[in-house]
Amino acid sequence: MSRDREVAESNSLLTRKYQDELIKIWRTELLLGVADPNADFLEIDGSSLSAVRIVAQIKEKLGKMLPFSVLYDYPTPAALAPILLTLNGDSHGEFL
């Protein structure tokens, strides 16, 4: 297996892990009964308060710090998970 393919598979597994954790956070903070990777924060009337709580949970559970405004650009677990992959720990990355 080539190094590029190994990295791609590793990234895919990590992205899936992030997505699964984000789904749990969405379900808890937005009181969703269904585990849906495409549950859209904006469409289910996510508030600024719930955005702050979600970002706090992401930092606590995944060690990733980002501004709550990122939820408006990447409003689903499926969209946000690959973005988390690009961040290192408490970095705000490209979001500032």
Image (cartoon, grey):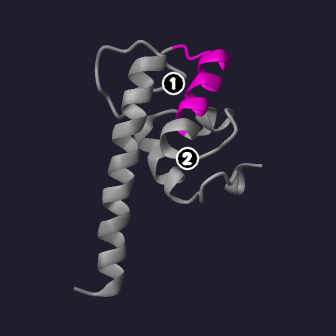
Number of the label disc, if any, that sits on residue 63: 2
Q: Does 2 lie within the magenta span?
A: no
Q: In this view, does 19 lie to the left or right of 62?
A: left
Residue 31 vs residue 38, the one in the foreground = 31
The residue that label 1 is drawn on is 41
Image coordinates for residue 77, horizontal then vertical, percent: 43, 37
- Picture coordinates of residue 22, whole percent (x, y): 42, 35
Classify residue 19 by image quadrant.
top left
Callout 1 amino acid: Phe
Q: Is residue 63 left or right of residue 38?
A: right
> Dot 1: within a 10 Å radius of its alpha carbon, few (fewer than 14), some, or many (20 or more) residues?
some
Residue 27 point in image, percent of width and height: 39, 21
11 w.r.t. 76: above or below = below
User: In this picture, is 60 found above or below 95?
Assistant: above
Q: Distance between the residues labelled 2 and 1?
A: 21 Å
SS for dot 1: loop
At horizontal 38% and vertical 64% (from top left) the residue drawn is: 11
Q: What element carries label 2?
A: loop
| Mark positioned earlier in the residue sequence (2 or 1) | 1
Amino acid beneath label 2? Gly
Q: Which quadrant of the figure contains the N terminus? A: bottom left
